[in-house]
Image (cartoon, helix red, strand yellow):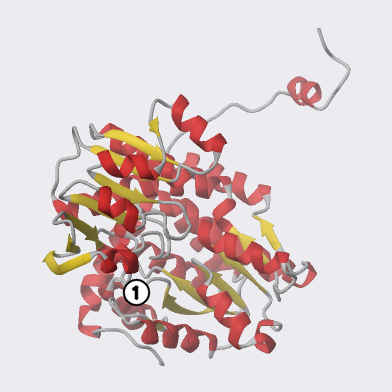
Amino acid sequence: MDYHVKDLSLAEEGLRLIEWAEMDMPVLRLIRERFSKEKPLKGLRIGACLHITTETANLARTLKEGGAEVFLCASNPLSTKDEVAASLVKHFEIPVFAIRGEDRETYYAHIKAVLDKKPHITIDDGADLVSSLHRERPKQAEEILGGTEETTTGVIRLKALAKEGLLKYPIIAVNDALTKHLFDNRYGTGQSTIDGILRATNRLLAGSVFVVAGYGWCGKGLAMRARGMGARVVVTEVDPLKALEAVMEGYLVMPMDKASEIGDIFVTVTGCKWVIRKEHFLKMKDGAIVANSGHFDVEIDLKGLLEITKEKRSLRREVEEYTLINGKRIYVLSQGRLVNLAAAEGHPSAVMDMSFANQALAVEYLAKEGKKLEKKVYPVPPEIDKEIARLKLSTMGIEIDLLTPEQELYLSSWEEGT
C-alpha cells in the first residue's frame, strides 16, 4: 500500500484514540452500520483532504465500510495526529499521506499523491485539493463525479470559482448544513479554540480583555465561551448586521485599531486576510497574545510583524515571542495556524459526529445523483439535515412532538386566520 506517515509504530496509540472518539459519535456509527450492509459507495474512489484527527478516522472508516476506496491527506500542516495516521494505515488499510509539521512542498506533494489515485469524489476542508485539481489537472477535474466542502473558507473559495464559471464538477457545501455550522462552528470552534489557547499558554481568562475578530458562527461560539470563562469580550467586525448582533448580545464592538490598544488576547476567526496588521501590533500591550482559529494562516500578518520585530524566539511549545522595535513583546500561538488543532485536539467528537454524518450522507447522495447535477455549489439537501438531527436526538434519548393531522392541514393552508 502506498502511504506516507511519520511512524507506523504509533499505530496502537492511534487505535485507542480512534476508539475513544468513536464512543461519542453514535450518529456516524449508525450510518456506518447501514453502509456496511448496503455498500452504497461500492466501486468509488474517494480522495479526502481533511484534518487527520480521530474523528476524521471514523469518517474514513465509515466511507470504506460503504464500499469505497479512501485516500487521505492533510488539510493543514499542523493538524495531523501522527498516531491516527499510522493507525489508519496499519489497522484499517486506508492510505494516508500526512505528517505533522510537513513543509509546504510536502503538503502539496501529499495532495498530489491523493489526486494520483484518480478519485471519483473529493472531500475537502479549505478547498486546497479542489483548487490544486482545477489549477494543475483540469482534464482530471472534468472526470470527477462530485465533491463536498467542510469549512466556511473553502465554501467561499469554491463559490468564487463557480461564479467565474470555472468549477468543473458539482460541490455540496457541507459547512452550510444547519446540523454543521450551527453546532460545529459555534460550539466546536468555541470550545476547542479556548482549549488550544489554554494548553499553549496556561493563562487565566477571567478578567482579561478577549478580542474576537469576526462574529460569524465561529466567532459567536468563541465569544460565548470566552465570556463564560470570565473574560471581558470585545468583537471587531466589518459587517454591520453581525456587529449589531454582537452589540445586542452585550459585547463591546469597535474597530481593530481601537481594540488593539486594550486587548490581552486576540483571536481571528474571519476567513479573511491580514485582519491583524503591523499597525495593530505596534499599539498592543506588552505581553499581548495573538492566535488564529480561521482555516488559513493569513489572518494574522506575520510578514508585517517580522518587519517591526527586532528579536524572535520560541518560548513554549506553540508560543513564539516577538520583541518589537518599540520594546513590547507579542506572543503568537501555533505560527498563526489553526490554534484549536495545532495546540489542542480540535472539535470534540460529539459535535464532529454531526459534521461527518453530513459528509457521509452527502457523499452517498453524490454517488446516486452526482451525474444529474450541474457544475455549481449546492446546499446539503434538507432531508439529510433533518435526518441527522433526528438521529442525534434519538442517540441522546430525546423525544419531540409530532404534528397532528389538523396541525399539518393548518400549516399548509391559507384559509384560516383571525
Residue 96 shown left or right of residue 207 in the figure: right
Residue 203 in the image: x percent, y percent? 14, 46
Q: Amino acid at mark 1?
A: Pro
The answer to whether one can see residue 68 in this image is no
Quadrant in the picture for residue 66 = bottom right
Tally of numbered tags:
1
Residue 108 shown left or right of residue 12 in the figure: right
Q: Residue furthest top?
A: 418
Residue 338 in the image: x percent, y percent? 34, 61
Residue at 58% over, 60% down? 155
The answer to whether one can see residue 143 in this image is yes
Q: Which residue is mark 1?
A: 77
Residue at 76% over, 73% down? 371
Up-down relation of residue 177 to residue 411 (above or below): below
**Local SS, label 1:** loop
Residue at 34% over, 74% down? 77
Quadrant in the picture for residue 99 = bottom left
Residue 224 shown left or right of residue 66 in the figure: left
Q: Quadrant of the C terminus?
A: top right
Up-down relation of residue 307 to residue 245 (above or below): below
Q: Quadrant of the N terminus?
A: bottom left
